[in-house]
Image (cartoon, rainbow, N blue to C red):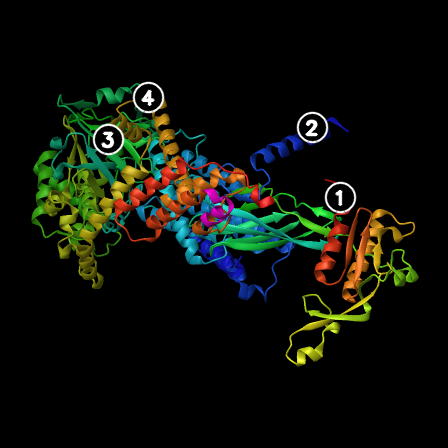
């Protein structure tokens, strides 16, 4: 074996396998791994002795301690992967023989697979395919002496032959339920809503075109207009003058939701009055958020297991959505929600900090008195928003301690966060129960219109106010300021350069946005199909696909078909291997071989490397009375094999040769020779 | 003998019988599915463990891509079965030649490996006795000689030749045991001895009989040079005159003193005598002295040169050989 070749193949493979994990790993591990790779480069290794077992034991302990330090645990995918990489680095330092190298190659397959725990995107898969090709080629390098190029070619052949088998397995193999459950750890910093609304949060989201969730409406003709698509996620009813947070009341906690499949609590029966209209059915495919809250249109209800309806009429999930989570939901039209507002809830939605924002406070009280009714007051505030020089911008100026006052009366520039926050403040200050709702607004069709895509940039905040007899009503002050934000959605809004602000980078951001929006749409769509059809290929979609393919629900039939297909492919390959292993003979040669076989018993078989003509001449010497037949056979053979003849002539010659063989004269013992 | 040992012996015998039915002793064999065995190597075992781990991870995390990855590696393993098998199948192995050697020395066995198709064969490991060689068959047919250590005088039938391959991935091992119809002649191990084991002879008698044989005493005639003839006897005069290589032959009276006689030893066993005779055969050939060899049932006429030496050694090697 070319020792250097295989060493470099091994090192390169390990590098390629760890590369996609690079940014995910703690820095010290990246460095340790790189050092051990470099250590084993033959040119360096000859000057640097490998560590002895004490040093290795020390390194192992240090690695364990480092993992504990970096992750606070030794378990879970992140810590586990890091542990694996520590093992690989140590194993690399003690690798001596071929067997050790195989251990490393096997581990590198495993490491390559672990990246799927963190990303299931299309490009991850493409990289994994590339990785498999490289590792397989490294295996070949360890088993042959020729060249790396040959190894890569062989690896490609093996891969392309394995692909059909793999596809069948993927399609048909029953998706088993988990043997035990893992919890993917939190805190991986996903883009998305947080459980409070601090200044600037939503503006950050508005610049991310990452997908938040997709919606598949059951009836595509029954989709509400875009301006009515308010995807409610969280309600904030606690305000400290700066940040809006969820209510601290235990009864409003997510754990006390009305879980689907259980008896509805009494508030759900009495406080929700819905119309007799048929609900709109839809399915939400939520990207991982690591959070429990789900997004839905009011008033929602879900039959999906583990999904519940909270007291503020939102959907929540029992388990945080660490992975893509799909749930069914229905939207009912409400006549009234909380028509009789309990006192504790009223108090919760009226409380304001005792100090701060005196101007806004005073204005609210005076206006409420002046207009006489809650409805008139709300109208007045909204029309003030509309008529005064308020601007919608993602880069608002900084606000001081009295945020509401500063915004309403000084800067007048902001986006949904500012408008909803100050509007809720003005309502509460006038004695109207109000809360801020955050979620997403709008969305757009996927390029081929099979799903509705909601992106992080669609993040929005609005207000719900409570009016006597009517209950909670939805109010969107942003709509008053920038109606196109609501009607056309954020992506239309983003076409307007002013929205991006006037800073040096805003122009750049805007042009980037335009340039990439089309490309991104395409890429997103491909990614969407990938996520939906491949990553999301679960028991249910398998069931549907196989039902379509086979028209049958029988599990045994499916398993039989799967094994049948596998066996057919495997045996086709086997047949190909065997047939290709056989030598192919010219029909004329086949006849000579048959003759030789016939004469084997008499010791007159054709010898290794003996030419056909020489063989026939030898037979002639040995059995003189065969001379006539042998002469004919020679003539016909040379006609077929050596003369450029037309097709018919050679066919005829072959027929004659066969006839000669059939009527072969008997063998005669040679008496004359012995005398 | 314990029961376990009995079972072991029994199993071994059955296995050998089965193997000799399946792969009988032949001059030439083309490997095919009847003759090639295939199973996971230890690396393949490791790979299977990996597949199991990936499968469990795939279903536990409900991660389709890990599951797909597992299926892909599983399929690769299955495909590798075909490729590993194909790296032996279709190869023709021919027994070419078994060499000669003195007992205890290594003796060469030459075999030819030839593809019966257009395939290339990589990394074939030949294990024969305690000899291992790794070869590729990539430029048509190939002859290789493996040197096995001989043990005792006689005909040396090599054990089964084991051909193994792990190509392309090392995850599977395909192998075959070939019983090639080859043998080597193993000469007795030469043991030096002081006294020439000359057969009985009488000079007077010889003079009287006038029978002469090739010897060193009296010039007899000129003969054409043959390989193995002594250069000392070449007639350089004739060569200088351009009459070709001629050698002068000498004769001497037959006395029996140049006969290596099996019976001329005192108090030695059969192998001891053969070993000493072998030594003398080599010695006399080196000294270019003509000699004859007399064995109980066989006598080799007086002669000299390498071919004479070989036939004498062969006679010694096969002396009273069983079968």
Q: Are marks 3 and 1 in contact (CB under 8 Å)?
A: no
Q: Are marks 4 and 1 in contact (CB under 8 Å)?
A: no
**Local crowd at mark 2 within 10 Å, few (<14), some, or many (≥20)?**
few
Residue for badge 3: A346
Task: Name the magenta segment's main secondary structure.
Answer: helix
| Secondary structure found at label 4 | loop
Residue for badge 1: B321
A379 or A545, which is in the foreground? A545
The answer for how far apart the CA atoms under marks 2 and 4 are is 49 Å
Q: Quadrant of the C terminus of chain A?
A: top right
Chain letter, disc 3 residue:
A
Left or right of residue B289, residue A373 in this image: left
Residue B75 in sight here: yes
The image shows residue A153 at horizontal and vertical percentages of 39, 53
Left or right of residue B274, residue A107 in this image: left
Q: Which mark is residue A554?
A: 4
Vertical order, B179 against A135 (above or below)? above
In the image, which is nearer the foreground, mark 2 or mark 3? 2
Question: Which stretch appears magenta?
Answer: A616-625
Residue name at image x 21 percent, y 64 percent: A504
């Amino acid at each position: 074996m070319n020792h250097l070749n295989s060493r470099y193949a091994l090192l390169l493979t390990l590098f390629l396998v760890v590369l996609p994990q690079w940014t995910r790993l703690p820095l010290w591990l990246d460095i340790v791994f790189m050092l051990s790779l470099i250590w084993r480069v033959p040119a360096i290794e000859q000057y640097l002795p490998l560590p002895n077992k004490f040093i290795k034991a020390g390194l192992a302990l240090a690695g364990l301690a480092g993992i504990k330090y970096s992750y606070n645990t030794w378990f879970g995918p992140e810590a586990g992967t890091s542990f694996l990489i520590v093992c690989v680095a140590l194993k690399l330092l003690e690798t001596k023989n071929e067997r050790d190298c195989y251990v490393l190659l096997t581990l590198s397959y495993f490491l390559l697979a672990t990246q799927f725990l963190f990303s299931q995107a299309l490009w991850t898969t493409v990289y994994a395919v590339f990785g498999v090709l490289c590792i397989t080629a490294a295996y070949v390098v360890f088993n042959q002496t020729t060249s790396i190029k040959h190894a890569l070619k062989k690896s490609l052949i093996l891969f392309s032959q394995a692909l059909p088998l793999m596809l069948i397995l993927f399609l048909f193999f029953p998706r088993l339920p988990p043997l035990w459950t893992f919890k993917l750890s939190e805190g991986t910093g996903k883009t998305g809503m947080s459980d409070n609304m601090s200044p600037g949060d939503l503006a950050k989201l508005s610049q991310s075109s990452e997908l938040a969730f997709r919606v598949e409406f059951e009836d595509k003709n029954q989709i509400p207009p875009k301006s009515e698509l308010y995807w409610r996620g969280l309600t904030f009813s606690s305000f400290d003058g700066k940040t809006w947070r969820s209510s601290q009341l235990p009864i409003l906690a997510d754990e006390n939701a009305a879980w689907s499949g259980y008896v509805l609590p009494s508030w759900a029966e009495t406080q929700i009055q819905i119309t007799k209209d048929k609900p709109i059915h839809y399915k939400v495919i939520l990207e991982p958020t690591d959070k429990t809250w789900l997004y839905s249109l009011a008033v929602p209800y879900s039959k999906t297991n583990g999904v519940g309806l909270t007291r503020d009429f939102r959907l929540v999930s029992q388990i945080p959505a660490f992975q893509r989570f799909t749930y069914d939901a229905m939207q009912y039209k409400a006549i009234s929600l909380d028509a009789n507002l309990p006192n504790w809830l009223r108090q919760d939605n009226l409380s304001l900090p005792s100090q701060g924002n005196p101007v806004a406070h005073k204005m609210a009280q005076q206006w409420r008195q002046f207009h006489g009714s809650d409805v008139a007051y709300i109208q007045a505030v909204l029309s003030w928003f509309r008529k005064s020089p308020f601007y919608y911008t993602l880069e608002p100026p900084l606000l001081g301690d009295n945020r509401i006052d500063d915004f309403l009366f000084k800067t007048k520039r902001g986006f949904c966060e500012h408008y909803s926050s100050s509007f809720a403040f003005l309502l509460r200050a006038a004695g109207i129960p109000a809360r801020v709702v955050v979620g997403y607004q709008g969305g757009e069709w996927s390029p081929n219109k099979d799903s509705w895509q909601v992106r992080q940039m669609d993040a929005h905040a609005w207000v719900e106010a409570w009016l006597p007899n009517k209950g909670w009503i939805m109010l969107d002050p942003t709509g008053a300021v920038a109606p196109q934000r609501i009607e056309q959605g954020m992506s239309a809004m983003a076409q307007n350069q002013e929205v991006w602000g006037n800073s040096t980078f805003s122009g750049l951001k805007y042009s980037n946005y335009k340039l990439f929006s089309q490309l991104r749409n395409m890429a997103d769509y491909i990614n969407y199909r990938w996520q939906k059809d491949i990553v999301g290929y679960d028991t249910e979609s398998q069931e549907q696909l196989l039902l379509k393919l086979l028209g049958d629900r029988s599990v045994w039939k499916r398993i039989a078909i799967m094994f049948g297909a596998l066996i057919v492919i495997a045996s086709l390959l086997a047949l190909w291997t065997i047939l290709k292993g056989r030598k192919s003979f010219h029909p004329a040669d086949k006849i000579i071989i048959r003759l030789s076989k016939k004469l084997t018993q008499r010791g007159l078989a054709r010898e290794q490397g003996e030419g056909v003509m020489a063989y026939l001449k030898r037979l002639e010497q040995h059995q003189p009375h065969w001379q006539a037949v042998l002469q004919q056979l020679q003539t016909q053979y040379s006609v077929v094999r050596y003369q450029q003849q037309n097709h018919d002539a050679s066919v005829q010659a072959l027929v004659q040769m066969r006839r000669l063989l059939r009527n072969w004269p008997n063998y005669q013992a040679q008496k004359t020779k012995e005398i | 003998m314990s029961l376990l040992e009995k079972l072991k012996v029994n199993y071994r015998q059955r296995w050998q019988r089965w193997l000799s039915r399946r792969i009988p002793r032949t001059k030439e064999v083309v490997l095919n599915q009847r003759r090639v065995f295939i199973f996971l190597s230890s690396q393949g075992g490791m790979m299977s463990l990996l597949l199991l781990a990936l499968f469990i991870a795939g279903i536990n995390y409900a991660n389709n891509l890990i599951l797909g990855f597992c299926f892909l590696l599983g399929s690769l393993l299955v495909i590798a079965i075909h490729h590993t098998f194909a790296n032996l199948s279709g190869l023709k192995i021919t027994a070419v030649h078994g060499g000669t050697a003195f007992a205890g020395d290594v003796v060469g066995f030459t075999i030819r490996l030839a593809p019966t198709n257009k395939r290339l064969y990589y990394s074939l490991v030949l294990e024969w006795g305690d000899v291992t060689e790794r070869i590729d068959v990539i430029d048509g047919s190939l002859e290789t000689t493996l040197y096995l250590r001989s043990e005792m005088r006689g005909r040396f039938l090599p054990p089964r030749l084991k051909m193994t391959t792990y190509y392309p991935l090392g995850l599977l091992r395909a192998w075959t045991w070939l019983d090639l119809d080859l043998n080597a002649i193993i000469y007795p191990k030469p043991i030096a001895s002081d006294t020439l084991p000359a057969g009985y002879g009488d000079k007077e008698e010889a003079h009287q009989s006038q029978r002469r044989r090739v010897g060193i005493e009296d010039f007899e005639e000129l003969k054409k040079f043959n390989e193995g003839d002594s250069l000392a006897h070449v007639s350089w005069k004739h060569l200088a005159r351009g009459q070709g290589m001629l050698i002068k032959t000498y004769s001497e009276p037959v006395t029996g003193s140049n006969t290596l006689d099996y019976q001329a030893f005192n108090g030695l066993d059969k192998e001891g005598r053969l070993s000493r005779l072998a030594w003398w055969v080599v010695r006399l050939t080196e000294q270019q002295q003509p000699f004859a060899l007399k064995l109980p049932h066989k006598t080799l006429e007086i002669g000299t040169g390498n071919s004479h030496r070989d036939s004498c050694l062969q006679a010694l090697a096969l002396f009273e050989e069983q079968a």
